[in-house]
């Protein structure tokens, strides 16, 4: 296990994070965000409804692709850290 503060970013290796802006717009977050904010939201309840509908519309294939992408990114970080 790598001690906190001693991982890749502490050594100058940049691994993409959810908040880094390096996650492609085609990712699950981009898909849901596009569906939720496609048009202005008149009420908080409409926001809740759109979030629920967008999440329900995610297909098993999309979830599988997200899983593969996360695994790939983790593998890249591991390789970068240990080389």
Image (cartoon, rainbow, N blue to C red):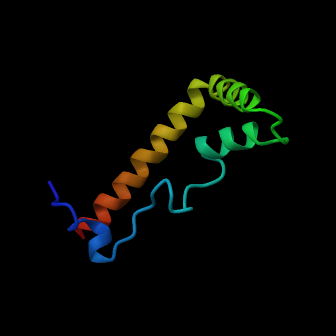
In the rendered image, the vertical position of residue 21 relative to residue 69, given as above or below: below
Q: Where is residue 28, by image quadrant?
A: top right
- From the viewer's side, name the closer residue of 52 and 74: 52
Residue under the image location 51 percent in, 57 percent down: 19
Image spot of residue 11 (x, y percent): 27, 75
Horizontal relation, residue 51 to residue 1: left or right: right
Kindly give the residue lying farthest to the bottom in the view shown: 12
Image spot of residue 69 (x, y percent): 48, 46
- From the viewer's side, name the closer residue of 83 and 4: 4
Horizontal relation, residue 83 to residue 56: left or right: left
Horizontal relation, residue 19 to residue 43: left or right: left
Residue under the image location 51 percent in, 62 percent down: 20
- The number of discs equals 0
- From the viewer's side, name the closer residue of 18 and 49: 49
Of the 4 image quadrants, the one containing the C terminus is bottom left
Q: Where is residue 79, by image quadrant?
A: bottom left
């Amino acid at each position: 296990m790598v001690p906190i503060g001693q991982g890749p970013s502490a050594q100058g290796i940049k691994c993409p994070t959810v908040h880094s802006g390096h996650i492609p717009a085609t990712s699950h977050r981009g898909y849901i965000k596009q569906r939720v904010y496609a048009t202005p939201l008149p009420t908080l309840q409409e926001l809740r409804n759109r979030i629920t509908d967008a999440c329900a519309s995610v297909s098993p294939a999309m979830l599988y692709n997200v899983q593969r992408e996360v695994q790939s990114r983790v593998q890249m970080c591991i390789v970068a850290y240990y080389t």
